[in-house]
Amino acid sequence: MRDEFEHFVLFFGVEDLRPEYAEACSRLGIPFAFVRKRGRVALRSHLEVLKTIRRVHPDVVMINGTPLAIPILGLRRLFRGEWAVVVRETQANHLKSRQEWLGSLIAARHAEAVVYLTEEYRTEVGKRVRAAARTGRAHVIPNGIDLREFDTGSAEASDRIRLSMVSRLVPIKDHATLIEAVRILVSDRKLDRIELTIAGEGPTLAALQAQVKAAGLSPDTVRLAGLLTRAEVAKLLRATDIYVHCTFGETMSNSILQAMASGLAVVASDVKGVANMVHDGEDGLLVPVEQPHLLADALERLIRSPATRRALGERARRRVYTELSQQRMVEQYRRLFARLTSLATGG
């Protein structure tokens, strides 16, 4: 959308700015800044964010996630900022903290637009936050994927069945069930050609390493690959036979979208934010959370049936192409931004 809009990206958080993000902005010619969040209240950090926004003087500020909506909308009112605010809801409703629910309330009441990733998600928020039901401010724009980036290109041939999962290593992801399911397949059911790669970093890394060791699984069977770049994720998916996503809840998982775009059969947890993306038996398989034996059953079914894997993967990619493409997502945001900038300029 650079032909129609000028962009500025402001990265804000407790973690270091990933070099991949900075390199992407530089490659695209998009100016950016990084503000580190310091402290629980982080008043000084929020004031630095406001200072940056006022320097850029935008027509629209888009916020990713509800917690930052509280200080940004408050400071906009205090300093009489004239920019419109779009808040993009990203956290699964049943996993939201009090601060995130407060952000949902503030955003629904005071932002010019709130973007929800699914209609189901917007409806759930509306049950707790009446202002979210205002159709003039509420917009449903699903995530979209670039099919050119995540293709179905072939990888090196292997006599092993390669599984993968890409996510942060955090408690809301159910990596423990996945590792136990692999142990069941390898140790109990003697399917020793399995190779699982878990990509990501986070606070549960040490516990997962300990679980792998206690299960007697070798580094060749379970590999904790750390944080990967988008290019490395695409390469991993091209080398994957079955994508697995074990989680206690999602809003709309980009990792699942990437796997579907790569033409992979997906085995995932039957939870909110996943069941609306993966249709059981049609373009993937759904399994109850914390049920390693049932997960092992689903994986074994696909391991023993390459034809079923291919059929599920082909239907998954076709669905992403028709319903969840990046082009479709961008067009929806373009129309939203155009309307808000027209309102801001009085056009």
Image (spheres, rainbow, N blue to C red):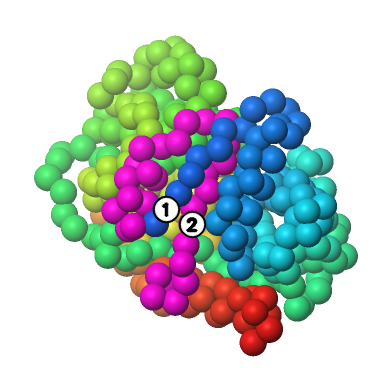
Percent across and percent down for residue 7 are 47, 62
Viewer can see residue 151: yes
Residue at the limit of the structure toward the left, as seen here: 157
Percent across and percent down for residue 174 are 55, 35
Q: Which mark is residue 306?
A: none
Percent across and percent down for residue 183 are 41, 26
Mark 1 is surrounded, within 10 Å at the Cα level, by few (under 14), some (14 to 19) or many (20 or more) other residues, namely few
User: Which secondary structure lies at badge 2?
Assistant: loop
Please say if 125 is above or below 214. Answer: below
* Between discs 2 and 1, the one toward the N terminus: 2
Tell me how far mark 2 sits from mark 1, CA to CA. 5 Å
Q: Which quadrant is the C terminus positioned in?
A: bottom right
Q: Residue at x 24, y 50 (%)?
A: 238
Tell me the magenta residue range: 1-29
For label 2, the residue is 8
Mark 2 is surrounded, within 10 Å at the Cα level, by few (under 14), some (14 to 19) or many (20 or more) other residues, namely some
Q: Residue at x 43, y 58 (%)?
A: 257
Disc 2 vs disc 1: Cβ atoms closer than 8 Å? Answer: yes
Residue type, label 1: Pro
Viewer can see residue 117: no
Residue 72 vs residue 181: left or right?
right
Residue type, label 2: Phe
Q: Which residue is drawn at 54% across and 23% down?
A: 203
Residue at the limit of the structure toward the bottom, as seen here: 347
Q: Which quadrant is the N terminus positioned in?
A: bottom left
Report the number of discs: 2
For label 1, the residue is 31
Give the quarter of the image for residue 153: bottom left
Residue 22 vs residue 119: left or right?
left
User: Which secondary structure lies at badge 1?
Assistant: loop
Give the quarter of the image for residue 123: bottom right
